[in-house]
Image (cartoon, rainbow, N blue to C red):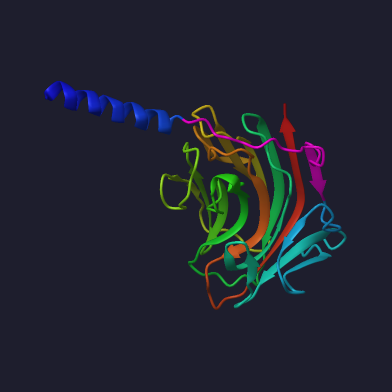
Amino acid sequence: MIQTIAFIFILLLSSFKAHAEIDLECPVLDTRSEQSQHFESDFSSLNGWGAHFNYPHSAQIVDDPIEGSNQALRVELQPGDVFQTRTGEAYRAEIYETYRAPFNAEMQYRFRILISDDWQFDNVRALIAQWHATPDRHLGEISRSPNLGIELRDNRFLIRGQTSDLAVNLHNKEGMVRQQHYLSEPIKTNHWYQFEVNVVWTPQDSGFLRVSIDDEVVVNFSGPTSYLDCVGPYFKTGIYRDDTPNTFVMFVDDYSRKAFK
């Protein structure tokens, strides 16, 4: 009797292990229309960017508030400004790249962000840059939290990551590893902050993440940086926030992205 129970237990354990180690099943992708491995935008226009906003004031090309001869992207989110996506309405005014980053290759992203005097600070989640995962919809996955996000929480920069080595994530809050990488001192308004992000996207321990702000390294992390997905994350910037009666205004300029292969 004991031998029979032990045998059944071994069978169940083997079945569970085999299920847990199922390889990620990915469709064959058509990469002919992929963007170049290198992309730059000085925000004299929004060519090359997708749009997640609804209102004329949401995203505008304007004169640089510091250097008038330069142009930059001005993003404004007023109370009640929502945008409808596949997963529902959200308070957002964002632009995004269609380029999906490769896994296991070093990527570099550079951009400048200025928080306006018109930003009415509030202690709510307010993403100003994020690297959004690409759900494996053929496996039933839905959109979920970004692999890496830069927030303005009240008046401080907050950098957080979320990763998973599960082949299928059906729930945003289950099977995930969340990590806070950095919380800044109170920031200055009307100051151009230079961000540089170097990263290897992978759900394995071989990943790394280095973030510099104004040439100071504030994150130097080794370990998992992404979900286990078929396609890598893509970059978004602008404002994605929780509900608040306050108006947020920021500027973005001089974006570049390149892959080292």
Residue 154, percent across and down?
A: 51, 64
Position of 207 compared to 239: left or right?
A: left
Residue 193 seen in the figure: no
For image coordinates 78% across by 36% down, the residue present is 37
Position of 173 compared to 122: left or right?
A: left
**Residue 233 sits in which quadrant?**
top right
From this view, report whether residue 62 is shown above or below residue 12.
below
Q: Quadrant of the N terminus?
A: top left
For image coordinates 82% across by 66% down, the residue present is 62
From this view, report whether residue 16 is shown above or below residue 145.
above
Residue 10, percent across and down?
A: 27, 25
Residue 245 seen in the figure: yes
Residue toward you, 257 or 29: 29
Residue 231, percent across and down?
A: 64, 39
From this view, report whether residue 260 is shown above or below residue 155.
above
| Start-end of magenta stretch | 22-41
